[in-house]
Image (cartoon, helix red, strand yellow):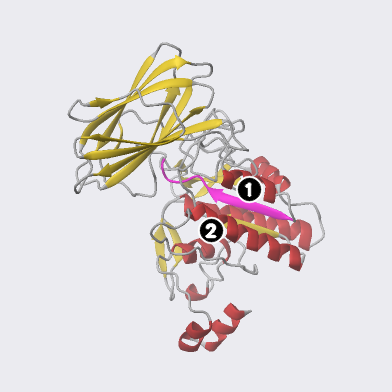
Amino acid sequence: EQIDEALALGENQGRRLVPSSDYSGHGTSVLGIAAGNGRASDGVNQGVAYESDLLVVKMGIPRENSFPRTTELIQGIDYLVRQALTMGRPMAINLSFGNNYGSHKGDSLLETYIDMVSSIGRLAICTGTGNNGNQPLHEGGILKQGQTRQIELSVSSREPTLNVQLWKSYEDEMSIYIENPSGNRIGPLDEKLGPQRYRLGNTELLIYYGKPGPYHLTQEIYIDFLSVETYVDSGDWKIILSGKRVRGGEYYLWLPGGNTLNRGTGFYEPRAYGTLTIPATARRVIAVGAYDSLVDSYADFSGRGSRMLPYLKPDLVAPGVNIVAPVPGGGYRIVTGTSFATPFVSGSAALLMQWGIVNGNDPYLYGEKVKAYLRKGARPLPGFEEYPNEEVGWGEDVIIRLH
């Protein structure tokens, strides 16, 4: 109600009532694709579900030493779900958000929370798979007992800091060594819980051995590269793993996404599979990848699933290349990424729920049922023979074509 009143008052008085702005334009573009009314284009560039009522949560501006943004995301989802329950209305939630922090097995706090809350009320939760598919941010494999693996990491010049997450089964014991570009080595690291500090050249290494949690069996070894002077030592770093007492042997490494690292920093032998960002790895979300609708082909930046998940992701793909989307203050711009593919599917979910729940055709058309209908109706993309698959899931979202 306050937002509607602010819009009616105009720019100056409205800003005083609702003192908030979209400085990046990301949220405005995403919401415009899902449900924009096309006013700035005389109705030409309408969103998918353009008559929807909207509830908008703005995440805070990151602050130094603040809580992780996933905490804010959980608070935002909690608010939306409570409002939907209070109003007694169905809701399609769009999460054009993702990061690399976690094991990517669907067992982090955020993923567990989303899976639990998705069974409350009448919801369909859609999220993008991220844009790491063609970036060197992920490595992994299987280490056998007595075997040694060497993971090479290139660190470009002028990198002030970076971190690496190594995830493995808690019961697997691996000796870990780290070697800097000059050939100096530390290790084997002490297999004890809590932080450890080492120095190699002009780089300080803060290493933290995690432990399993109430919802997961995996263990994280977090390696923080901190500059002693100005920048982390550039060149070829090595993380060496040796199988000490191994049962399963799976190990996976991630660098932070979101274009936070300089060009040239990344693994020498990256894996494209397993590059879904979190929370696209949650079981009950509708995970949306991207394809180029102009040439009807898969977008190689789109995050991909992997066999390490106990269920297949993504669920489907939607247009995510050179999309016309609104910007704050009026007008349009061209955007690319899975953030902008996701609202096509969020809008599609809203249309299905309107037909089923609001119009009285199917009062149970929400949650996994929406996902099942979207999967079944997905159209194959050229170049893929096996469906579903880790790149495009069950295929292309066709609700937008029908709409």
Q: Is residue 152 above or below residue 145?
A: below
Q: Amino acid at mark 2?
A: Glu
Q: Looking at the rendering, which quadrant does residue 73 occupy?
A: bottom right
| Residue 363 makes an appearance in the image | yes
- Note whether 65 is above or below 255 in the view shown: below
Mark 1 to mark 2 CA distance (whole Å): 13 Å
Q: Depth check: give the residue in front, 50 or 370.
A: 370
70 with respect to 357 (left or right): left
* Disc 1 to disc 2: CB gap under 8 Å: no
Residue drawn at x 47%, y 45% as measured from the top left: 291
Please provide percent x and percent y for residue 239. Answer: 32, 27
Q: Quadrant of residue 89?
A: bottom right
Residue beneath disc 2 = 72
Residue 137 in view in this figure: no
Q: Residue at x 50, y 61 (%)?
A: 30
The residue beneath circle 1 is 113
Disc 2 is placed on an element classified as helix
Which mark is first along the chain, 2 or 1? 2
Q: Name the residue rendered at 45%, 43% in the picture.
A: 100
Q: Quadrant of the C terminus?
A: bottom right
Residue at x 75%, y 67% (from the top left corner): 86
Left or right of 247 on screen, residue 123:
right
The location of residue 233, given as percent across then percent down, is: 20, 39
| Vertical relation: 144 (above or below) 82 | above
Where in the figure is residue 352, as x and y percent of width and height? 70, 55
State the extent of the magenta-drawn residues as a range: 122-132
Residue count near mark 1 (Cα–Cα under 10 Å), binned few <14, some 14–19, many ≥20:
some
Between 11 and 109, the one nearer to me in the picture: 109
The kind of residue on which mark 1 rests is Tyr
